[in-house]
Image (cartoon, rainbow, N blue to C red):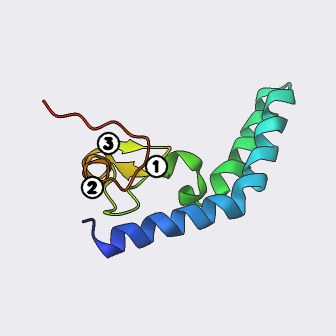
Amino acid sequence: MAKKCVIEREKKRQKLEEKYHLIRRSPKKEMIKAQSLSEKWQIQAKLEALPRNSAPTRLHRRCFATGRPRGNYRHFSLSGHVLREMVHECFLSGATRSSW
């Protein structure tokens, strides 16, 4: 189980990303249209003024049950070992059990 503070930090990053999504997208479109290097630097300065945690690359997908940051299945938003346990307990219909 992940620490509560880590999970809360991730939630905070998600809220910031949603808040600044449109604000971050418009300068990127301007960057493509900019002709001179000085214009690009000005646009880059606008992007750098935004909070770091509002960048979508800072987000991590976490397991819904345990908060584990690695080995997640996007469709279920569960980590691999939790998904396997749920399949063996027949909580997920249509999934095939396997053991080796």
Specify the label residue 89 is tagged with: 2
Disc 1 crowd rating (10 Å Cα; few below 14, some 14-19, many 20+) is few
Q: Where is the N terminus found, in terms of image quarters?
A: bottom left
Q: Residue at x 40, y 51 (%)?
A: 92
- Mark 2 or mark 3: name the one nearer the start of the chain: 3
Residue 17 lies left or right of residue 78; in this view the side is right
Q: Name the residue under label 1.
A: 76
Residue 51 lies left or right of residue 76; in this view the side is right
Position of residue 84 relative to residue 6, above or below, is above
The quadrant where residue 35 appears: top right
- Mark 2 or mark 1: name the one nearer the start of the chain: 1
Specify the label residue 71 is tagged with: 3
Specify the label residue 22 is tagged with: none
Name the amino acid type tagged 3: Gly
Task: Look at discs 1 and 3 and give the one toward the viewer.
Answer: 1
Task: Look at discs 2 and 3 and give the one toward the viewer.
Answer: 2
The quadrant where residue 10 appears: bottom left
- Mark 1 or mark 3: name the one nearer the start of the chain: 3
Disc 3 crowd rating (10 Å Cα; few below 14, some 14-19, many 20+) is some
Position of residue 7 relative to residue 95, above or below, is below
Label 3 sits on a secondary structure element that is: loop
Residue 72: image location, x then y, percent: 37, 45
Q: Residue at x 43, y 72 (%)?
A: 8
Residue 70: image location, x then y, percent: 31, 46
Distance of mark 2 from mark 3, alpha carbons? 20 Å
